[in-house]
Every structure is written in structure tokens, then in C-alpha cells.
Amino acid sequence: MTLFTIPLRHAKAKWPRTLLLIAVLTLGLASMTGLHRVSGMIGESFEKKLISYGANILITPKKESLNISYGGYSLGDVSLDERPLFLGEAITAINRIPLRANIAVIAPKMLTAARISGGARQESSVAVVGVDFEQEIALKSYWEAAAGSLSSPGPDAPGEPVPALAGALAAEKLGLTPGQDLEINGRALRLGGVLRSTGSDDDSVIFVPLGLAQAMADKPGLASFIEVAALCSGCPIEDLVEQLSAALPGAETRALAQVAETRMYAVNFAQNLAFSVSLVILVTACAMLIMSMFSAVAERRREIGLMRAVGFSRARVFAVFVSEAAGMGFLSGAAGYAAGRFLSSYVLNRLQLAENAGLDFDLLNFMAVSLAAALAAALAAILPARSASRVEPAEALIAL
């Protein structure tokens, strides 16, 4: 008899109990593995959906200003120096940072004022925002069309009117309707759609292609500011801001703290909930293992006494029970990992919560889960094994 054959012989003799205990442990570990994967993928998917509700990092030109007042009269803040924000250089620098994969959307803006004609009023002043429509619509999925279409306007063809979108208040003020041909600072414009009211600054402006706004402001290749939507779950938002600041020394980069914290709270809530449930499952499974092992010790007191009588030391008896629990834990971990991957893929695909949730198998994770389950089972068996090692040989001899 060895430390390995004794647990195997007992497992074979008590196979219904062994299978039941392995099944319970497997169910618990499958739940933990599945919940961990589901929470991770849902957190990632959830954050990508939250990206469409606005930026969480703002890049603006670096400027110096001075508040001037004298004799009770204030001139307010006077700009002393403002460095231009070159869009091409900025985009190139952003694309080179190590955490570029954590940036989902880069939405540059050019702000200017213009005179517009062609609406219900003959001519009016309006705020114009130049945007990259594809990036802007990706950034703001809360945009809805009150009239017309919000499909991303394509590049304007030579001789054709430039496509544009109007905010709700701007359209109401100017009497604009979708499909209407307008003229803005002498340039032909065709309104593709009118936004439903958002309660934000978007309501009061006209959105035009970025190149047109740059030409109107006589600032080719420049941007007023750049909005960045970053994924915060993969790294702290501070790390992204630090890398962006280093890559853009001539610009000012800051995180919109409230937006970032709100997103991270929403993402972390699902992951923390899954972790809490997994922890409860693990504790419950270990408690069941402890009770089962205590029951096995009570049933096998005669066997333990005989082992002690034929020369097994307390340490060897202790090792028999710990190795038995560790073996069941390893098998449960292996089966639980496989079952958890299958169940998580089924749930994710069934509920369409994440894309590409296939049955991928990671050998390193498989071994880590199996060994961790074996270790947890061995630790749970310490008290029952300690109780078994204290059985005296005399008890077995008296029973005989």
C-alpha cells in the first residue's frame, strides 16, 4: 500500500460518494470559470457600448492666459499664447502610444461661426462644428434623427452640395428641413438630417465635414480640440492620459473624471458581482468537501487504526487524506474548466452579449485552474486529515 494506491482503492470502493463529490466540485468550478469568462467579456462589451455615450479624454491646444483688471475695470482672461493643434501630427502621435489598443474613437472638432442662408430666415449667424462624421456617430449613439437621416454623410463630390446635420434648436431657429439646399459663407450645403434634442450643446450647432470647417476658419490641418473615447477596463485612465501627454507635449490632455469613473463603476459592478458569486460557490464547495472528508474519517476509523498498527505514521495517514482530496480537486478542476468554457460560450452566444465567444482552450489556464482546485481541496481537507492522523492503533485492535 502506498500514498497513491490507498486513495484510489477507497475511491473505487466508495465510487457513488466519490462521483457525487467530484460532480459537486465540478459544478462549482464550472460556475466559477464560466462566470469569470462571462463577466470579463460582458465588461469589455459593456464598455465598448458605453463608448458611444461620449468621450472620456479631451485634448486641447496648450495656451497661456492672464486675467487683467485695473481700477475696478476687468478685461477678463486675455490669451497671451496659444499653440495650434495640428491634427495630422496629433493623430500620428496618438496612434504610436503603447496603449493605442485601448482607444476606441478619436473625434476631432473644428469650431467656427458662419453666416447661413436658405432657411426660413434670409440670413442668420450660426455656430458650425466640423467633424469626422464616421467617428462622431460612433462616439454618440444617443443621436437620433428627428427628421431625415443620420447615416454617415460621405465625402462631398466636386460640384455637389456639402452634406451636413443640424441640431434641434438650430434647425428650429433657422427653419431648416432635411434635403434643403443652403449656403454657408458662400459654400453650397445640403442638410441630410435634423437631430432630436439631446439637451446638450449639439442642439444649437450645424455639423459639417471637418475639411469645410477648417477652410471656413482659415485653419487648414488644425483642430480646435480632439475628443477621445478610451477603454478604461484594460488600464487606468491615468496611464492613457500620461502617455497622451508625453506624445503631445504641445497640447493639454485631461481626463473627464466623472465620465471615466461612471463607466468604470458600471463595468466593475458586473465583474465584482461575478467575483462575489464565485467566492460564495468556492466556499460552499470547500465546506461540502470538509463535511464529506469528516464523514469519511468517521467511517474509516477502523481502517485508519489498522494503518497505524502496521506502521503508518501520523504524517503518512495525514498525507493519504490530503492526497485523496487533492486528486478529487484536480479532476474537478479539469472537468470544471472544460464545462465552464462550454457553458460560458453557450450563454454569451445565446444572449448575444459578446462577439466571437468560441470554445477557445488555453492550456495554461486549464492547468492553473486544475492545480488551484487541487490546492483548494487539499487545504479544505487539512482538518479532517489532521483528525484522521490522531486515531490511535488501539481503537482498531479493540474493534477487531
Image (cartoon, grey):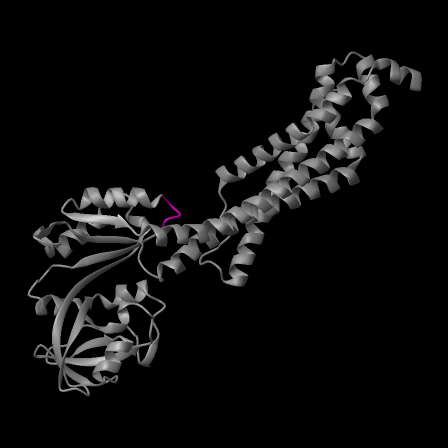
Picture quarter containing residue 279? top right
Relative to 176, is 385 above or below? above
Relative to 168, is 347 above or below? above
For the N terminus, the quadrant is top right
Q: Residue at x 17, y 66 (%)?
A: 210
The one of 313 and 272 positioned closer to us in this rendering: 272
Give the residue furthest to the top.
311
Q: Position of residue 359 (x, y in %)?
A: 51, 52
Residue 309 within the magenta-colored segment of the rendering: no
**Residue 383 relative to residue 298: left or right:** left
Q: Position of residue 35 (x, y in %)?
A: 55, 49
* Residue 32 in view: no
The one of 121 and 303 positioned closer to us in this rendering: 121
Q: Residue at x 90, y 15 (%)?
A: 397
Q: Residue at x 21, y 52 (%)?
A: 59
The one of 353 and 238 positioned closer to us in this rendering: 238
Q: Residue at x 65, y 32 (%)?
A: 377
Picture quarter containing residue 201? bottom left
Q: Which region is colored magenta?
A: 231-235
Q: Position of residue 142 (x, y in %)?
A: 36, 68
- Prevailing secondary structure of the magenta residues: loop
Give the residue furthest to the front.
71
Residue 234 within the magenta-colored segment of the rendering: yes
User: Total marks drawn?
Assistant: 0
* Residue 172 in view: yes
For the C terminus, the quadrant is top right
Relative to 190, is 398 above or below? above
**Residue 239 relative to residue 384: left or right:** left
**Residue 339 relative to residue 22: left or right:** left
Relative to 28, is 347 above or below? below
